[in-house]
Image (cartoon, rainbow, N blue to C red):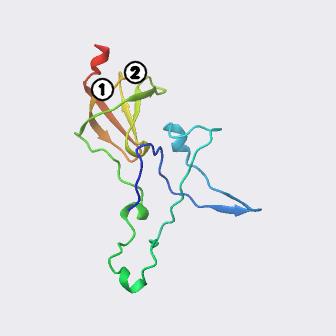
């Protein structure tokens, strides 16, 4: 199992192209639209090969019968890390184009919070979940802003 830190900002699938000794891949435009990354900035990335697992020990293959098959995440897009009706505390990081607060939770998943202001830490209820974004309402405002 790969340990995924809370600071992970984005997860997506891309094909690596090689030309003239350099390797490149395209970052989906949605990663920029959802503020997971900013053009012109430098990021640390991790590359995970899909389609099979790789053993990290010197154990003969006959003893690896307990290895798991590729995870669902490797076979398709990851499931959103929130569910409709879920109550959770978030930190509003910025304001979106429509004036709503934007919080990021596990794996950089975006949660839109109307009336949220940068720095607020409200308790919200997740009302609508989509693949790349969720919409929430504040059920308990940040006590520091009362």
| Farthest-out residue, right | 20
Q: CA distance from mark 1 to mark 2?
A: 10 Å
Residue 55 location, quadrant: bottom left
- Residue furthest out toward the top: 146
Q: Quadrant of the N terminus?
A: bottom left
Dot 2 corresponds to which residue? 117
In the rendered view, tell whether residue 16 sits above or below residue 44. below
Residue 122: image tag: 1
Q: In this image, 15 relative to 134: left or right?
A: right
Q: Position of residue 5 (x, y in %)?
A: 42, 48
The structure residue drawn at horizontal position 37% and vertical position 72%, both measured from the top left corner, is 69
**Location of residue 122 (image quadrant):** top left
Label 1 crowd bin: few (<14), some (14–19), many (20+), radius 10 Å: many
* Left-right relation of 86 to 62: left
Residue located at (47% from left, 72% from top)? 54
**Residue at the image point whose x is 44% and y is 74% from the top:** 57
Looking at the rendered structure, the secondary structure element under dot 2 is loop
Secondary structure state at the residue bearing disc 1: loop
Left or right: where does residue 67 sit relative to residue 38?
left
Residue 38: assigned label:
none
**Residue at position x 58%, y 61% from top?**
15
Q: Residues within 10 Å of mark 2 (few under 14, many from 20)?
A: many
Q: Quadrant of the C terminus?
A: top left
Q: Position of residue 3 (x, y in %)?
A: 40, 55
Q: Residue 24 location in percent, x, y?
A: 66, 56
* Front in this rendered view, residue 81 or 97: 81
The numbered mark, 1 or 2, whose residue comes first in the sequence reads: 2
């Amino acid at each position: 199992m790969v340990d995924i830190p809370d600071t992970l900002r984005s997860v997506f699938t891309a094909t690596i192209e090689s030309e003239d000794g350099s390797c490149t891949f395209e970052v989906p435009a949605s990663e920029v639209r959802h503020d997971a990354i900013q053009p012109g900035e430098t990021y640390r990335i991790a590359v995970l090969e899909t389609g099979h697992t790789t053993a990290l020990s010197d154990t003969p293959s006959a003893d690896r019968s307990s290895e798991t098959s590729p995870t669902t995440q490797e076979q398709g897009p990851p499931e959103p890390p929130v569910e409709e009706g879920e109550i959770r505390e978030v930190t509003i990081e910025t304001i979106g184009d429509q004036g709503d607060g934007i919080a990021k939770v596990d794996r950089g998943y975006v949660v839109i919070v109307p009336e949220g202001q940068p720095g607020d830490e409200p308790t919200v209820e997740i009302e609508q979940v989509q693949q790349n974004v969720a919409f929430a309402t504040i059920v308990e405002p940040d006590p520091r802003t009362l």
